[in-house]
Structures are given as C-alpha cells and as structure tokens.
Amino acid sequence: MQYMLLLYADEKSWETFAPAEQAEAVAAYMAYGEALKKAGVYVAANRLGSSGSATTVRMAEGKAQVLNGPYAESKEQLGGYFAIDVPDLDAALSWAARCPGAHHGIVEVRPFWTDPA
Amino acid sequence: MSPREGDVHARGMADAVARRSYGKLVAFLAARTRDVAAAEDALSEAFASALADWPVNGCPANPEAWLLTVARRKAIDGARRRRSGELAANELQILAEGFEAAASQEEIPDQRLALMFACAHPAIEAGIRAPLILQVVLGLNAVMIASAFLLSPAAMGQRLLRAKNKIRTAGIPFRIPGREVLSSRLDTVLDAIYAAFAEGWVDAAGTDHARRDLAEEALFLGRLVAELLPEEPEALGLFALMLHAEARRRARRTPLGEYVPLAEQDPALWDAEMIAVAEALLLRASSLERIGRYQLEGALQSAHVHRRRSGEANWPAVVQLYDALLALSGSPVVAINRALAVAEISGAAAGLAAMQEVAADSRLTQYQPYWAARAELLARQGTHGEARSAYGIAIGLERDPAVRRFLQQRQAALAR
C-alpha cells in the first residue's frame, strides 16, 4: 500500500536555527531518504518552498481567484513529503516515527486513495 | 424429522455455531482483505443460506466449514460486483489463495486476537473501539450496543461503519503487534474490553438482560485474551479484576432489589471459586514483574475481599495501592476512592482534603460517585446541610433506581 507522509512544522522556529543546525537537519532528511531507498520502500520525496512562496487558486463565478499565501493560516505549515510503499499502516507509522519531521513537527500519514467497498 | 422439527434443529445448530464461531469466521474472512464490513455481510448471508438449506438437507457434519465455503463464495461474488480491473483481479487472487489454504486445514485458525488488535488500533477513534470489538468479534447487533453506549442506533451504525472503512482504507494490519509495542497496544484492547464490561456492569442485578449479556461477553473476551497472551500480566490482571467484580454480583442486591454497598455485603454470597481463580491470576501476573493499571485494580479488589473476610483493617495498604494507581493513571476517579480510604485512616476531614485536590476537574461535576463520596464524608464530619445537598446532586445524577433509593435513604437518615 502506498502512503503519503506529510511533514508539518513551525516555519518560524526553523528560522531561529543557526546555519550549522539547519545543515544538520537537512542532512538528517537526506539520510532518512537513503534509508527508505535502501529498504526498498521509497516512492518519491520533496522539500517544499516555505509557505511564503505559496499562492492559492480558486474558481469562483467562472473566474480564477488568485491569492497570496498558503491555504491554511496555521502555525504548522506543510514543508515537504515522502511517499512510501509498505505492507500496512503499522509499517508506515514506524517509518513516520523515524522521519526527522516527527521531531521538528508532526507527520501526517495518509494512504493513497482506494475505492470504497 | 418433521419439517418443523428440522427447522428448529437447524436454527439451534446455527445459533450454536454463531455463538461459538462467529468471531473466528469474521476474523478469518476479514484478515486477508482487511474488509470487515464485507466479511460480516458475506457471513450473514451464509447464515441466512444455512437457515434455508439445513432444514431441508440436514445439518452438515462440519458447520463451520460449510459456512466458510458459502461465505467465501459470496465474498468473491461481492468483490467481483464492486470492483473492476486490475485491483479486483489482485483481490480475487488473495481471496482465492486464502480460502484454498483454509480448505486444506481441519480447523479454522483463530485470528480473533489479531482482529481485536485491529479494532483497538490507535488509528481507530478511541470511543468506538469497544463497540467495534463487541460487534465484530461477538456479533452483537448495533441496536443493543448503541443503547448500552448511549447513542442512537443510527449514530452508532454510522461510526461503526466509519471505523471499519478506516481499517480497510488506512491498511490497519490484522496482526498481534511486535514485542516493542505489544504492551502498549494491548492496553487499548484491554481498555476496550473493560469499557464494555463497565457498561454491562451498570446493571449489577442483572435484571436488564441485554446489559447482563454485555458483561458476560466482556468477561468472555477477557478470558480469551488472557488465554491467548498468558505472558502478558495486564491481560491476566484485567481478567482477574472482572472475575472479582462478577464474583460479588449476587451480593450487590437484596432479594427485594435494594442496593448493597461492598462494606455491607455478605461475603457468604460471593462466588468463592471465582475469587480463587482471580487470586491465582493476580499471583501469576505479579510473578511476571511488570506492574500495570489492571493488576493494581485487581490487587485493590483482592484487598477489599481480604478485609471483609478476615475482619482485619488494611487501609494503609489500600491507600498505597491507590497511590500507585494514581501515579500511573492520574485519574480523578482513583483520587476519589483514595480519599475515601484516607478517611478510614485519618478521618473525614482528611478525606475531604484529599478530595479537594481533584475537585477542580470539571468532569467530576457530572460524576455521581464523587458527590456520593463527598456526601458520605460530610455526613461523617457532621456538616449535615452540605451533606444533604451533595446527596441531592448524587441522586440527580444516578441512572440506577436501586442506587438512587439507597442514596435517598442515606440522605433522609441525616439528622436535621
């Protein structure tokens, strides 16, 4: 089964990290990605630009409504994702717990869509 | 056999198989596809077929296998109807392989424990775990479960369906968890079983037939888990705890149906054999050297029983047990019971002071035993006006008419 690991974190606290700390965190994410590949469960991954780089689009009354900023005005923002292919939820949760994102913020584990019964 | 006799015989056989094997059959059918709802549907259709077929063709030698064969056919048909394309082909393959394996075995493997772990998985909404286990492992109907948990059947049905869908779509495994997480996962299974037991125990006299069954069913599940995981002390602890409570059932009501608190019960009415089994379980649990909430609650039951039988006050030991339990659970309910024990040693004022420490918890304003305990201690202290008010609140919060009457009597007995 394929799962998305969606990484949410407080961007403001990231900005308070010294460059050395930030580099260390990035290295941790790289190592995590390598571990996923070595285990044969890696599907895809990406780091997203900060929420300041986001723009929303909504169609309203036939026109595109374009607004600056991310969808949700929350303290934690979506910062990246890992897509993995594992046998069941427990395996996905186990990988999510090992993700550096689980230390810095929260990881949401969501399966890819399956047809309803 | 006449047609009517055949009918009755078939029904009897079907009922017996349902009681014995429902959970095993659901667990087996659902384990491969993680689709609990589909397994239940297939099985209920199989039972319907049995009631049509067995009166005519006689009861099969192996009714479980018969039901499984029919259910698997219906499950495959159902899957074929619902899905199409590659996904369906995979699923049908899985179903077929699984049932091949089963057909070659004499007895259907018991995967009920794995099913319970799936139902009590942390990814399942906490409030629905107990009802889910009761429906899926015991086959209890949604109407009965709904009334026990104070929900409308429609609301209960909806939440149960959501939970079953979650198991399927999120890929919750049917597996006894690995050693690292087993104890913590087991806690949620045990909590769910205990929640069901507590709901059944609301009717201590056993006059509400549906509720009494609930307590019995929970006891059955508790025994099952203890038997399947004999090295898990908390599983043993929970079963012992429930046995202790069950052992005193007959003493909780007078022949006229009046409520009798533990302190006034006649130990001769207790089921001594059940208590002995509970004690043996607690002993074995303690030898495994991993203390937990249910063992502590069991030990408290043990202490109360000992005190009543021997006449020896053991309140300091009881307070120590409550201290340990409070440290583990932080539960205000435990704090209340601890305060009552403190009062036995140091007087009503000390007990009231101990209760003050948790009085700030807003949940307690709706909790009858808190007000009843407060009233009791206020009465002992001599502050009858406040005691009377507290009894009033307790009475207003109590569901059970017999307990209400008891509280009313206590209230009325207070000198003006």
Image: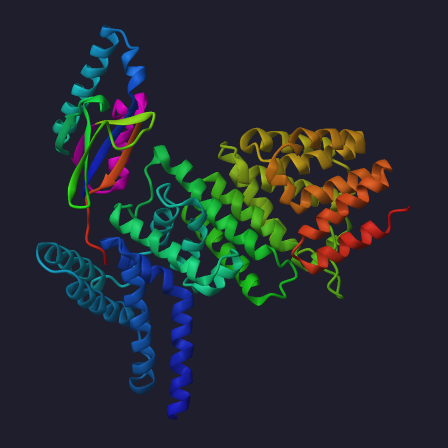
Task: Pinpoint residue A68: horizontal percent, then vertical percent.
Answer: 21, 27
Task: Pinpoint residue A10: horizontal percent, then vertical percent.
Answer: 31, 21
Identify the residue at image location x=39%, y=54%.
Answer: B159
Residue B226 visible in the displayed image: yes
Relative side of A91 to B189, left or right: left
Relative side of B243 to A68, left or right: right
Task: Pinpoint residue B29: horizontal percent, then vertical percent.
Answer: 27, 60
Task: Pinpoint residue B333: horizontal percent, then vertical percent.
Answer: 62, 39
Figure quadrant of the N terminus of chain B? bottom left
Closest to the observer, B319 or B35: B35
Q: Determine whether B178 is above or below B82 in the image.
A: above
Identify the residue at image location x=62%, y=51%.
Answer: B245
Identify the residue at image location x=43%, y=65%.
Answer: B141
Give the residue at the far right of this rendering. Answer: B416
Q: Determine whether B410 is above or below B292 in the image.
A: below
Identify the residue at image location x=28%, y=39%.
Answer: A90
Give the residue at the far left of this rendering. Answer: B86
Q: Quadrant of residue B405?
A: bottom right
Q: Determine whether B351 is above or below B99 in the image.
A: above
Q: Quadrant of residue B54?
A: bottom left
Region in magenta: A80-105
Residue B264 belongs to the span the image colors magenta: no
Relative side of A71 to B228, left or right: left
Q: Determine whether A79 is above or below B263 in the image.
A: above
